Amino acid sequence: MRKLIECVPNFSEGVNMGIIKQITDEVEAVDGVRLLNVDPGKATNRTVVTFVGEPEQVIEAAFRAIKKAGELIDMSKQKGEHPRMGATDVCPLIPIANISMEETVEYATKLAKRVGEGLQIPAYLYEYAQPNKSRSNLSVIRAGEYEGFFKKIKQPEWAPDFGHAENDVKRGATVIGARDFLVAYNVNLNTTSTQLANAIAFDVRETGRSLRESDPITGKVLTDNNGKLKRIPGSLKSVKAIGWFIEEYGIAQISMNLTNIEVTPVHVAFDEVRKKAHERGTRVTGSELIGLIPLKAMLEAGKYFLRKQKRSVGVSESELIKIAIKSLGLDELAPFNPHERIIEYLLKNTADTRSFNV
């Protein structure tokens, strides 16, 4: 059986579709690689691309895409709602079939070395690919973003894993790693308040919020005897979240990364945000999936909402998916086609399916 890995690079361009097309053309030019999804966001000025294939072909496609993005995107002029540090902001590899995480780490390291040394773009390893666990978290690496990296990269503890310790003015730096399957998921609110959205995000995300003296917003941040920030944990494990306002839609959202959907499934995250939003006087109106989602997650969501309605879960797969879409409001902002967003359907519903048997 063939080894398959998925690659989900995030490029710091979500407006100019001509640039995005030139980048994805590089991916599609590599034999044996399937481009599964291209998901641009105007307000975030970011595009999430998903492709899959055998490891050597995937890292070749990723390298070509990173190279092309560096040629076309000028980070000194780039602005957007989403945190970012480079033209190719992050490029994770995910084991899909017949390959271990350890092997995937080797391919991620190989790609990062090629980017850092071959393209002279500062490259950082993250998640499973990063042996130094104090700098394996993406948000910790990216702190300061592109503008702050000109100073940050000069600090000995923040020297890149590959490439020179000099932030590239045009291309920035990039983060490459190996991780488990992650679901990027946004929940829509009936408010325009970023402050309110952030408050809800802090309520639910695993890291919660900093503990403050007296006032929870303006009070002095408290630390322990070792100088470490004291925190109030959030209610959801394996969830990262921030709040933001999306001008394109005219609403605020809770933007989440569900890093382990076995621990916190999509439907649990949705209902918890709905609960916390209600407590703060606002309401969830729907949600938005960024990229792809496993079939199992959609089926579990359908069953969850049927049980809440005290109805039988003994319905067809297509009916479960329909209930999940409607209950989560996944079609509020744009039509949701399960054959374009569920990874198993994408791998099956293609002309050359047999070459991707897992």
Image (cartoon, grey):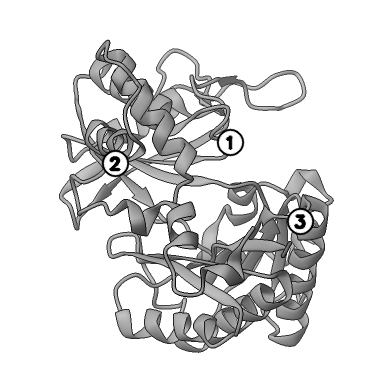
Is disc 3 placed on a helix, strand or loop? loop
Mark 1 or mark 2, which has the lower sequence index? 2
- Residue 69 seen by the camera: no
Whichever of callouts 1 and 3 sits on the residue coming sooner in the sequence is: 3
Kindly indicate the quadrant of the structure image that contains residue 175. Answer: bottom right
User: Which residue corresponds to mark 1?
Assistant: 260
**Where is residue 315 drawn, in percent x and y?**
31, 28
Instruction: Please state which of the two labelled residues, at mark 2 or mark 3, is closer to the viewer.
Output: 3
Q: Are marks 1 and 2 in contact (CB under 8 Å)?
A: no
Most foreground residue, 355 or 279: 355
Location of residue 295 by image quarter: top left
Q: Position of residue 227 (x, y in %)?
A: 72, 27
| Within-10-Å neighbours for mark 3: few <14, some 14–19, many 20+ | some
Q: Please, what is the three-letter code of the amino acid marked with disc 2? A: Gln
At x 53%, y 60%, the residue is: 145
What is the C-alpha distance between the residues marked 1 and 2?
Answer: 21 Å
Q: Secondary structure at mark 2?
A: strand
The amino acid type of the residue labelled 3 equals Ile
Figure quadrant of the N terminus: bottom right
Amino acid type, residue under disc 1 in the picture: Asn
Task: Inspect this view and state whether residue 251 appears.
Answer: yes
The CA distance from mark 1 to mark 3 is: 19 Å
- Identify the residue under disc 2: 253
Q: Which mark is residue 99?
A: 3
Secondary element under disc 1, as helix, strand or loop, is: loop
What is the C-alpha distance between the residues marked 2 and 3?
36 Å
Task: Report the quarter where the C terminus lies.
Answer: bottom right
Residue contact between numbered discs 2 and 3, judged by CB atoms under 8 Å: no
Q: Residue at x 57, y 30 (%)?
A: 262
Q: Nearer the viewer, residue 192 or 313?
A: 313
Q: Residue at x 67, y 50 (%)?
A: 179
